[in-house]
Image (cartoon, grey):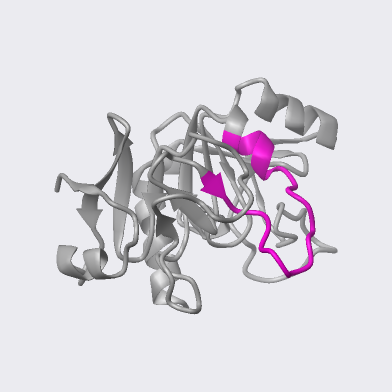
Amino acid sequence: MDVARMAIARAALDELRPGEVVNLGVGIPTLVADLITAEHRITLHSENGMLGVGPEPETGGAMDYPINASKVPVTAMPGASYFDSATSFALIRGGHIDTAIIGGLQVDEQANLANWAIPGKPLLGVGGAMDLAIGARRLIIAMTHNDRDGSSKLVPDCTLPLTAAGVVDVVITELGVFKFRNGRLTLVKLQPGHSVEEIQQHTEADFDIDL
């Protein structure tokens, strides 16, 4: 188990509210599904056409279970429903998703998000990320704090192609939790074992501190 990725997923779960309809994007966000229980009273939506997504099954594969947007087999919660992609995106674009948790390549000081294209690498298309970024009532970005080369993913200005502008509400990394408050990126929580000084050292973006 990747400790850093699970720390991000647990912090993302802490941000969710009972009764919400939540969409989990590919990658780290899908880990949240395995942490949700019936007591959380959270309904998970998958953009490929499922409402009421449950955790990954202990045994069996895609021939035995439905899959989520990451092509991972999942179980269905009681009362789950299935529908076509057009209906699924109508839910997203119609403002019926309370919170979306998706990954990120860059988030900047203006709450802009870039998460779909890296120059020089094959492009798979923006997928549903743009719809979720604009359509969800609240947008949480779950991502590692730094890229593989050590560069900060929290930057003064995005240099990668934008997914959407001014849409990010919360950013969760393995180092801490940030929220945009009064137009300012603000560190509101430290992940266990990490410090403000460490975060400052690994972050290019300017941010306030309100712990």
Report x, y in % for residue 91: 69, 26
Residue 30 in view in this figure: yes
Q: How many marks overall? A: 0
Q: Evaluate whether residue 37 shows in this view.
A: no
- Residue 67 shown left or right of residue 179 in the figure: right
Of 192 and 151, which appears nearest the observer? Answer: 151
Q: Which residue does the image show at 51% across and 29% down from the upper left?
A: 98
Residue 74 image offset from top left, x and y in percent: 68, 56
Q: Position of residue 161 (x, y in %)?
A: 64, 50
For the point 62% across and 44% down, the residue is 163
- Within the image, what quadrant is residue 119 found in? bottom right
Q: Which residues are magenta?
A: 113-133
| Observer-nearest of 127 and 108 | 108
* Residue 130 drawn above or below residue 136: below
Could you tell me what secondary structure mostly forms the magenta stretch?
A: loop
User: Residue at position x 73%, y 48% from top?
Assistant: 126
Judge whether 186 appears above or below 26 on screen. Answer: above
Residue 23 is one of the magenta-drawn residues: no
Q: Is residue 122 magenta?
A: yes
Quarter of the image for residue 79 reads top right
Vertical order, 198 against 179 (above or below): below
Instruction: State the image coordinates of residue 137 (x, y, percent, origin top left).
Output: 51, 27
